[in-house]
Image (tube, rainbow, N blue to C red):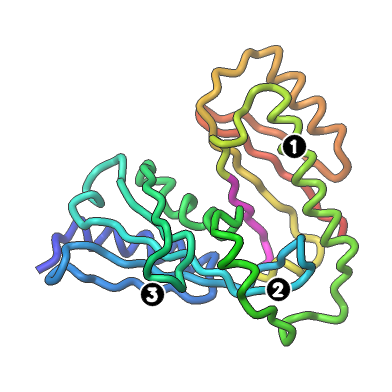
Amino acid sequence: MINPEVKSRINKIDFELKAFFENVYIKDKFYKTGFFEISANKVAYLKESKDYRRLEAKVIINQPDLLEEKVKWSYSTNPLSETSMWIDRVSDFETLSEDIINIVNEKRLSEDYIFNLEPIVDVINEDVDHENLEKEFDAQDSIFSILEKYGVGVMKKETLVHSVNENFLNDASDRLIKFYHNTDLKISDKFKIESEMLALENVNWCLFKEDHIEINYTPSF
């Protein structure tokens, strides 16, 4: 029988992933190998090819690791290949779901996998202003550049975009981006970062937390 605490924790992950992904599947392989296999997918817009493809995050977590505050887990760089490279990660349990989401959010998958997927044409809404969608990606790039400038390491940042609307392409919903980091920022740098962030078009506010920075902005839709 599965440990009640493990069950509670995997249910939490399942709930959080379903708030972002369209499909989430969690297989309990305890009796065979003692781990959970998580598969979650959604249709995502690719800036490079200017189309939509269904991207998947495939993750394995050993059940005993779920009882730790620092959870060890791995994800496949190509969920369609049994011989793909697996990347080992360690996450705080409270941010584990966000780290899994970021596999798709930040396209941390092999290019062979992403660009060999068939583009999805039936989800494209003719009313969507693709020029403004491009502007939103450019706005996020500008935010990244400011953080890099002040030593908030690119490799250490994690982002999660929250929207009031469930559909990423809907109008008027503010975005909240979280950047997790381990940088000890000086007060003077915080002031400069905030000033430069607020100078960007549509950025509403910038908030510094203990281990992350929150940026709220309104898309150009």
Query: Is residue 125 positioned above or below 141 on the image?
Result: below
Real-space CA distance between mark 1 and mark 2, rounded to the nearest whole angstrom: 30 Å
- List the residue tagged with mark 2: 52
Q: Which mark is residue 186?
A: none
Q: What stretch is highlighted in magenta?
A: 159-165
Residue occupying the point 29% across, 41% down: 69
Q: Which mark is residue 25?
A: 3
Q: Is mark 3 on a helix, strand or loop?
A: strand
Q: Which of the two marks, 1 or 3, is nearer to us in this view?
A: 3
Q: Where is residue 23 in the image (x, y as percent from the top left)?
A: 48, 76
Looking at the rendering, which quadrant does residue 11 occupy? bottom left
Q: Which of the two marks, 1 or 2, is nearer to us in this view?
A: 2
Q: Which amino acid does label 2 sit on?
A: Tyr
Question: Contact, CB < 8 Å: mark 1 with mark 3?
Answer: no
Q: Is mark 1 on a helix, strand or loop?
A: strand
In primary-sequence order, the first of circles 1 and 2 is 2
Residue occupying the point 80% across, 80% down: 125
Q: Farthest residue toward the left?
A: 1
